[in-house]
Amino acid sequence: MHHMTLAEIARGLADKKFSSEELTKALLARIAQLDPQLNSFISLTEELALSQAKAADARRANGESGALLGAPIAHKDLFCTQGIRTSCGSKMLDNFKAPYDATVVAKLAAAGTVTLGKTNMDEFAMGSANESSYYGAVKNPWNLEHVPGGSSGGSAAAVAARLLPAATATDTGGSIRQPAAFTNLTGLKPTYGRVSRWGMIAYASSLDQGGPLARTAEDCAILLQGMAGFDPNDSTSIDEPVPDYSASLNGSLQGLRIGVPKEYFGAGLDPRIAELIHNSVKELEKLGASIKEISLPNMQHAIPAYYVIAPAEASSNLSRFDGVRFGYRCENPQNLVDLYKRSRGEGFGAEVQRRIMVGAYALSAGYYDAYYLKAQKIRRLVKNDFMAAFNEVDIILGPTTPNPAWKLGAKNSDPVAEYLEDVYTITANLAGLPGLSMPAGFVDGLPVGVQLLAPYFQEGRLLNVAHQYQLNSDWHTRTPTGF
């Protein structure tokens, strides 16, 4: 049963080939057997999962239906789940049990999903390798000596290893799409505001966005359907109707205009990945799409702008973790200043401290105009580049990452080298655009992803293109050896 996709599970449950309880027990046993190799889970929720599975079976017995009713998933451990540890991969929140459910968790529970657990992640979602977690690094099931990508590496590794069919994730600068590329999955970052951030512990509020990680575009459509929608609790949520994403999957690509930015194929890109991206372009041409070279001239400024804006917002968001109200508190503080310093110094890991310091510096008097304000101006230029490009083309295509997954520990001593791996993904977050990564082949036995970007609220078009590509390729069906 573990090889079934979400869509296949929905059909199997509808046809009474198995129950949600049977499926849940099988996957929990598989997690117990295989996850020690991967470290993809922080918490397992067996009792909750079995009670939700029984409830889903009862709802189906009473005539209810739905693609997610009885489907097992897991949540990235920054979505608040009532009464269950929500750690954000940090010592700071190791003892925190959320008093409420995040909107995403509540919506998916109402749709009938079964929560198997909370997945491992980079601490406070800061990282591209899932090595900064307080609970240890996550391993890539395609090669246990390599990273799975981050910050949603736990969700990606668990789905790629067939421990469950799909999981929630978040993307601040590529943290859904990059792990998807590194683990041979399909991952979708929706338009900013499409999925509620209420109850999603913040890293950088103007960039964070929740989305689905699954093996196929069809499964991402199903999971996104349950996640998306307006939320009055979230001031950044957009009151825009949610289309039926599954209904648009089978549309023809005839006449689709695909733009390929010339800036994507510079010196930093592994030529073997470039070849795989060009192969995917040829496949889409066969399906009726036309290809046009375009330019995104301000892409070169995106990484420095992002690594000013994101740390600046992080320094503000993480100021609430001070040892006073909740979370980690140092022992025997001498006074209030000592409480703040030691609680934060002991509770936050090195990468989080690094970004807080950078952000506080960028926002400080005398430097705000020189760094933060200038970065926001660059952000507008990046958005303008995309708006101009989308006057000429329908979607933009390129590599998701410049290189395949690197070895565990290879970039620990050089944070900037890790930051540069986000070069193709962060522009979508700066502009607030939807982006999708889908499997496109392998380099040295490690998966490679192709990225698609679309105008605002056109997630359906991305899913349609990815689905049609997957109907005519088999990269997404490959399974890591041993799993």
Image: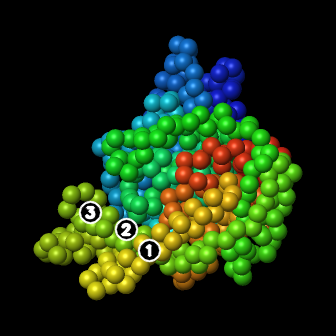
* Residue 118 position in % (x across, y down): 48, 48
Identify the residue position indicated by label 1 in the image.
377
Counting residues from the start of the chain, the first of labels 3 and 2 encountered is 2
Counting residues from the start of the chain, the first of labels 2 and 1 encountered is 2
Identify the residue position indicated by label 2 in the image.
314
| Relative height, residue 222 to residue 275 (above, below) | above
Identify the residue position indicated by label 3 in the image.
320
Q: Is residue 206 left or right of residue 365?
A: right
| Alpha carbon separation for disc pair 3 and 1 | 28 Å
| Alpha carbon separation for disc pair 2 and 1 | 19 Å
| Relative height, residue 205 to residue 459 (above, below) | below
| Relative height, residue 175 to residue 212 (above, below) | below
Residue at 43% in and 69% down: 310
* Residue 385 position in % (x across, y down): 58, 68
Q: Secondary structure at mark 1?
A: helix
Residue at 74% in and 54% down: 257
Instruction: Using the rendered image of the protein, determine whether residue 409 is visible from the camera's viewpoint.
Output: no
Instruction: Using the rendered image of the protein, determine whether residue 221 is visible from the camera's viewpoint.
Output: yes
Name the residue type under label 1. Lys
Q: Is residue 409 left or right of residue 268?
A: left
| Alpha carbon separation for disc pair 3 and 2 | 11 Å
Label of residue 191 in the image = none
Q: Secondary structure at mark 3?
A: helix
Q: Secondary structure at mark 2?
A: helix
Name the residue type under label 2. Ala
